[in-house]
Amino acid sequence: MTGQEARNARRAVAAMFTANGFAMGAWAPQIPLLLPRHGITEAQLGLLILGLGIGAVGAMLFAGRLIGRFGTVPVLRAFAFLLVPMLPLVVLAPNVVLLALAMAAFGGITGSMDVAMNSNAVEVERRLGRAIMSSSHGFWSLGGFVGGTLGSWLIAHVSAEVQALSTSAAMLATILIALRFLRGEPPHPVTQDAPRARLLPREAGIWLLGVMALFCVVPEGAVLDWAAIYLGQELAASPFAAGLGFAFFSGAMALVRFAGDGIRNRFGAVATLRASGLVGAAGLLIGALAPTAPVAIAGFALAGLGVANMVPILFSAAGNYPGQRAGAAMAAVTMLGYAGILVVPALIGWLAEHVGFRYTYGGLATLLIVVMPLAGRAAMADGRAVPAQTSVAT
């Protein structure tokens, strides 16, 4: 891969992160509308979100196997195209049964694309010889901010259906532009006498990184799926303002993530992870104790500033785990990490119904505090640069 190809590949994978984040950001303001549209309760909505999460997490390990067989680029292409129609299918579902099936498919495709684009970002990091993971996630957050803000406006001024179809059109255009510039490593050949690859890695260190990622992502999932309901029901926010909870959280994450690679290069992964946990916990506590919606939104924005660099550091550590291919370790850590945004929020809905959102968000702050003394486990994230290789998959 030439230097120019590597730079183009960096832009292409950034576009994929943006498209994926745009879809999730547009999904956030649609969530409260499912309650009156289908006549369901918060607990029932939590079960539907659980189905979405199970679909995502269940698909992630198999995505790792697909990457090992075909390489990151073909897998990323396939799941990016499959994601394009999913939001309209969810929004236009005529009944709860089809809604549950559409949400499970939405989760599975989103999760598989996540593994592929994160694994591809690790490969591009190696070719460039510098970190790009934090800024790649910054593009995801930027997509989430635009998708959430624009999506809230379209829902308020036009309709939920137009918002969903517009989201798909924007995603398709982005993917088509980026497609020809994707580059990655070729798949690893499997010989007849090679040991059979395990679906689940046995290294305890990989699973510890996954648990840390889970604790870092749970707050993000809680803001994505429940902030709009919390702001609307408990703090009397308008539908537009309620949609800004995740939008500002995601926008704050984007700002920090674009600077995150430089911060990590200067202070190191371990120190950055510890400081980030402290800031993120403070933001969640402000959101939980806020007397008004604007204060809560500001608290969520501060939480976004703190959480921003935590998951990218842990994903880079997984991608550079000794003795593991990026796809294998990434699939395991991504599976646990994204359970925090796709599965655990279903439990948050149950908790919120019984103890309230304030205690729930306050309790989530402790998860980030737990990560701080474990930050040393992510030191391998700083060993990402390896000599460039000449092989390339397109």
Image (cartoon, rainbow, N blue to C red):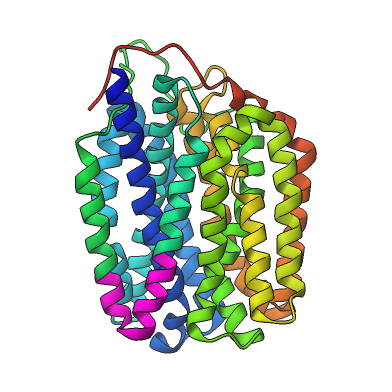
Q: Main secondary structure of the magenta part?
A: helix
Which residue is rendered at x = 36% and y = 60% of the image? 106
Q: Is residue 89 visible?
A: no
308 on left or right of 35: right
Q: From the image, which quarter does the C terminus lie in? A: top left
Over which residues does the magenta segment extend?
147-165
19 on left or right of 47: left
Q: Is residue 15 above or below residue 146?
A: above
Residue 286 lies, in percent from the top left, at 75, 67
Q: From the image, which quarter does the N terminus lie in? A: top left
Residue 153 magenta:
yes
Which residue is rendered at x = 38% and y = 72% of the image? 151
Residue 25 is drawn in which quadrant?
Answer: bottom left
Residue 168 is drawn in which quadrant?
Answer: bottom left
Q: Is residue 29 above or below residue 126?
A: below
How many numbered marks have been drawn onto this rendered protein structure? Answer: 0
Residue 227 lies, in percent from the top left, at 58, 72
Q: Is residue 371 above or below residue 196?
A: below
Q: Is residue 111 visible?
A: yes
82 on left or right of 144: left
For the residue pair 66 and 167, the one nearer the viewer reads as 167
Residue 70 lies, in percent from the top left, at 27, 29
